[in-house]
């Protein structure tokens, strides 16, 4: 039989259901603030690890197959283009290494020497899968990884810090995560500025218009050993404002990262002369 | 149908980009009654990918709050729809 009105009891049941759902969510939120959550996180991390590994393997295979299927002409053109880039980069690498050695010698002569030990780690998951701007690496407690260790990529670019460690994996919170702030200097200027993470490898800095900044300038993190935060991509100067907004980003696509280096030991020796 | 959708959702959490996962959760909330699997997927994302400290995109609200609110809204809207009985 079809009735044209709602019973009071039915309404009460619905209200109770909604209240139950709300209570369930409050309990879940509380759960995320407890240490039990990190235990669950480790368990889920361990369960998901084989899937991540299989996914990265499948991705590599697909890229290789795609290359095999590409037309010969496009492959020749790409090869030529890459060879040209390689010529330029290898020439620059000679001078870079010499300058780097000279820099280290000068620092040592002035009583400050620095050294880092790196551990190579495979990237299991890139930031695109979550709203938290984090990477998952395939190293953890077993490899003596600890919270706070810096993570680098080629070219001395620091991308973030280890924020959670599991048995065989670690979560790295990227410096570009929303709301993250850290000190930088831009280009040849030694004026410190505060960089703010904008997500996905992008940052913003507000600096006085008097500071000369150009597109392509390197952004440094103040440290004895070279550490770079990114490369200036765009500058926005508004009329009537004394500040300029500088947007910088990493010169690589973080979503395509396959390997990263975890700085497992960092040493800065100071000898008084 | 629901089980198949759940498997696809789990696959999306592990492999696909976040917008795709959220789109699937969104579809699930409207297509299936009391779609708690959507919330479970969000909990899974939080446990898997969230580091220590900050919440989603600089806000103080974790993704779970948004998913929870959405589920409640979807269920409330559903309660106003009169379904045909057999």
Image: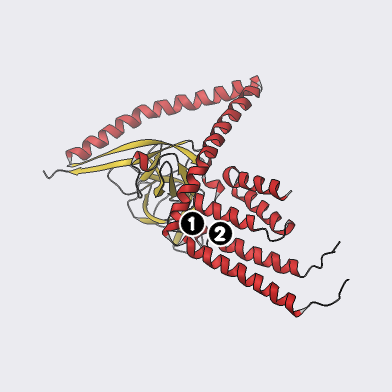
User: Is there any visible trace of residue A152 in the rendered image?
Assistant: yes
Q: Residue furthest left?
A: A273
To which chain does the residue with label 1 belong?
A
Residues packed near mark 2 inside 10 Å, few (<14), some (14 to 19) or many (20 plus): many
Residue at 19% from the left image edge and 43% from the top image edge: A269
Q: In which quadrant is the N terminus of chain A drawn?
A: bottom right
Calculate the distance from the C-alpha at mark 2 to the C-alpha at mark 1.
Answer: 14 Å
The residue under label 1 is A178
Judge the density around disc 1: few (<14), some (14-19), many (≥20) Cα neighbours within 10 Å.
many
Residue A84: x and y, percent? 50, 24
Q: Residue at (70%, 55%) from the top-left corner? A: B28
Q: Position of residue A26 (x, y in %)?
A: 54, 67
Q: Is residue A92 left or right of residue A131?
A: left
Whether A124 is drawn above or below B45: the answer is above
Q: How is the image coloured?
A: secondary structure
Q: Estimate the x, y position of residue A4 in percent, counting from the top left.
A: 86, 76
Q: Which mark is residue B63?
A: 2
Q: Is residue A252 visible?
A: no
Residue A231 at x, y percent in the picture: 44, 44
Q: Residues at marks 2 and 1, common chain? A: no
Quick check: A64 left or right of A198?
right
Q: Quadrant of the C terminus of chain A?
A: top left
Residue A251 falls left or right of residue A144: right
Comparing A115 with A249, the one in front is A115
């Amino acid at each position: 039989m079809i009735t044209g009105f709602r019973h009071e009891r039915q309404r009460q049941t619905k209200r109770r259901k909604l209240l139950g759902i709300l209570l369930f969510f409050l309990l879940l939120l509380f759960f995320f603030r407890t240490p039990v959550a990190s235990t669950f996180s480790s368990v889920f991390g361990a369960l998901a690890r084989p899937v991540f590994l299989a996914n990265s393997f499948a991705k590599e295979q697909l890229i290789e197959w795609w290359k095999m299927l590409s037309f010969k002409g496009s492959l020749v053109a790409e090869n030529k283009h890459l060879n040209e880039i390689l010529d330029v980069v290898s020439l620059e690498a000679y001078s870079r290494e010499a300058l780097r050695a000279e820099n280290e010698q000068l620092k040592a002569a002035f009583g400050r020497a620095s050294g880092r030990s790196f551990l190579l780690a495979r990237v299991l998951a890139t930031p695109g899968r979550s709203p938290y701007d984090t990477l998952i690496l395939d190293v953890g407690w077993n490899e003596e990884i600890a919270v706070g260790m810096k993570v680098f990529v080629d070219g001395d670019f620091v991308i973030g810090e280890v924020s959670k460690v599991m048995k065989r994996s670690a979560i790295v919170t990227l410096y570009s995560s929303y709301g993250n702030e850290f000190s930088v200097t831009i280009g040849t200027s030694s004026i410190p500025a505060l960089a703010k993470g904008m997500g996905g490898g992008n940052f913003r800095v507000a600096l006085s218009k008097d500071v000369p900044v150009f597109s392509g300038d390197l952004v440094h993190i103040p440290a004895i050993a070279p550490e770079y935060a990114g490369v200036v991509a765009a500058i926005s100067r508004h009329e009537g404002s004394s500040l300029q907004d500088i947007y910088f980003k990493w010169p690589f696509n973080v979503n395509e990262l396959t390997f990263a280096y975890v700085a497992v030991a960092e040493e800065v020796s100071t000898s008084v002369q | 149908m629901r089980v198949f959708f759940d498997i696809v959702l789990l696959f999306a959490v592990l492999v696909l980009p976040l917008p795709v996962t959220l789109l699937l959760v969104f579809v699930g909330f409207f297509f299936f009654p009391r779609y708690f699997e959507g919330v479970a997927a969000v909990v899974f994302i939080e446990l898997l990918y969230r580091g220590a400290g900050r919440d989603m995109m600089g806000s103080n609200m974790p993704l779970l709050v948004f998913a929870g609110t959405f589920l409640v809204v979807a269920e409330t809207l559903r309660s106003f729809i009169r379904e045909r009985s057999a």
